[in-house]
Image (cartoon, rainbow, N blue to C red):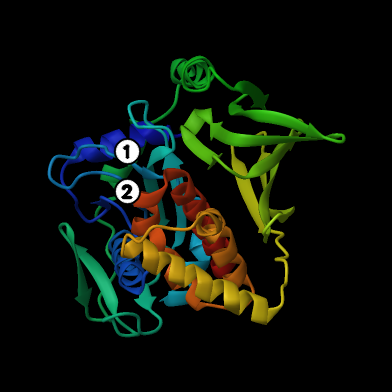
Amino acid sequence: MINKRLLVKNLLAHNDENSFYDKKRFINIGQKEGKAKFLKHVCALANSNPKNHSFIVVGVEDEDNKIVGVDFFDDSKIQNLVNAYLDNPPLISYENIPFPHLPEGKVVGLITIKSNGKVCTLRKNIWKYYGGSVFFREGSISMPKAYNIDLKDINSQAVSNIELHARNNIELTLDGVIDFINNRHKDLESNYKVFKEQFVVCWAGIQKKVKKEVYFSRVDIELINEQVKLFYSTLDEVTISYDEHSFTTIEYVQLGLGKTQKYYPLEKMVINFEANGTYQIQSDLIFEPPLYNKKTLHHILNANNALLQKLEKKIALTPSEKTDVKHLPNTYLICYLNGFENAKDAMENARSLVKKYDVEIHSSLKEALRILRKVKYN
């Protein structure tokens, strides 16, 4: 098993960006330009490494390799995005890697790319890139190339050595469990479970019981062996269950208009552990969004847009408008789920305004955008 924190450190220490490794301060696949650039790099790294893994490390300063982190990025449908835009798409995963010095909720993103051995091409136009384009790595740059170029294996040994030096051991695992329980979550109820005598899953959160069901909020779940954060949320509620072979979570999201709020199951994640030292993560979206009257939602959408204009112009809000701003992420999300697609652009544009106005509302907005990504790419 590979300790992903060590893998990130070894990649950063290896040398500068090259044909099997790239680093980014952040990625933005919510906007067309950011999505296009991300797909270009994935395509180039897959074509430049037909026989081994390639990587993108997110949350690192380009100048000095300083690890600054990014927000926890919970997008289990990122493979769907790659499949939609690339022919011969690689297998791709995005993992959230915690580092001790980063603030709560901040992680380093590790994107792992595995080519299928065939030339990967852009399937359709996006931003300034044309469908049919092929990209390869030249040093640290992703460049367009002719389609009929041969795929060459030049990095297998280098990548194997980096992965070998990132192998886990019992000391690192024990240190990880102790740090999770005693340091990072000493104010929360923490638990751990060992699966197949190898895998250690730790989780922490605020527990509450509703009838006979136990829910957790402020949830943090990590696979300690690989130093991968599996789930993190400051708002949503989660149920956790497990047996000798698997660990299961169901995430719930609170939605509604005004005082009428209800919890809806969003996504079910099951980790199945095998006796041969492997595991598989299966995520299924089980969300059925609430439906509302379109005229009511059209009025709410216009009211939200007017609130953002007031925030932008720094006009004082009335008491009722202050209440409406608190519900703004929630109501924008409901509008989008009911067919008002321009609500997504409004949510993206609201980021900076809301962040200046209220940190808690900004956190709610990030959660709403996370849910939106899950639904969109499913």
Circle nearer the viewer, 1 or 2 = 2
Helix, strand or loop at disc 2? strand
Report which residue position mark 2 lands on: 58
Residue 101 visible in the current orientation: yes
Residue 195: image location, x then y, percent? 67, 28
In this rendering, position of residue 46 left or right of residue 89: left
Residue reaching furthest right?
212
Q: Amino acid at mark 2?
A: Val
- Vertical position of residue 277 compared to residue 92: above or below: above
In this rendering, position of residue 93 left or right of residue 240: left
Residue 133: image location, x then y, percent? 29, 81
Q: Which mark is residue 121?
A: none
Residue reaching furthest left?
63
User: Which of the 4 image quadrants contains residue 267?
Assistant: bottom right
Helix, strand or loop at disc 1? helix
Residue 372: image location, x then y, percent? 54, 63
Q: Which mark is residue 8?
A: 1
Q: CA distance from mark 1 to mark 2?
A: 10 Å
Residue at the (71%, 73%) spot, across then down: 292
* Badge 1 vs badge 2, beta-carbon distance below 8 Å: no
Q: Quadrant of the C terminus?
A: bottom right
User: Which of the 4 image quadrants contains residue 330?
Assistant: bottom right
Residue 208: image location, x then y, percent? 73, 31
- Vertical position of residue 159 compared to residue 167: above or below: below
Residue at the (22%, 81%) spot, across then down: 146
Q: Amino acid at mark 1?
A: Val
Total marks placed: 2
Residue situated in front as seen by the camera: 189 or 221: 189
First reached walking from the N terminus: tag 1 or tag 2:
1
Residue at the (53%, 60%) spot, across then down: 328
Classed neighbour count for the residue bearing mark 1: other residues with Cα under 10 Å, few (<14), some (14–19), many (≥20): many
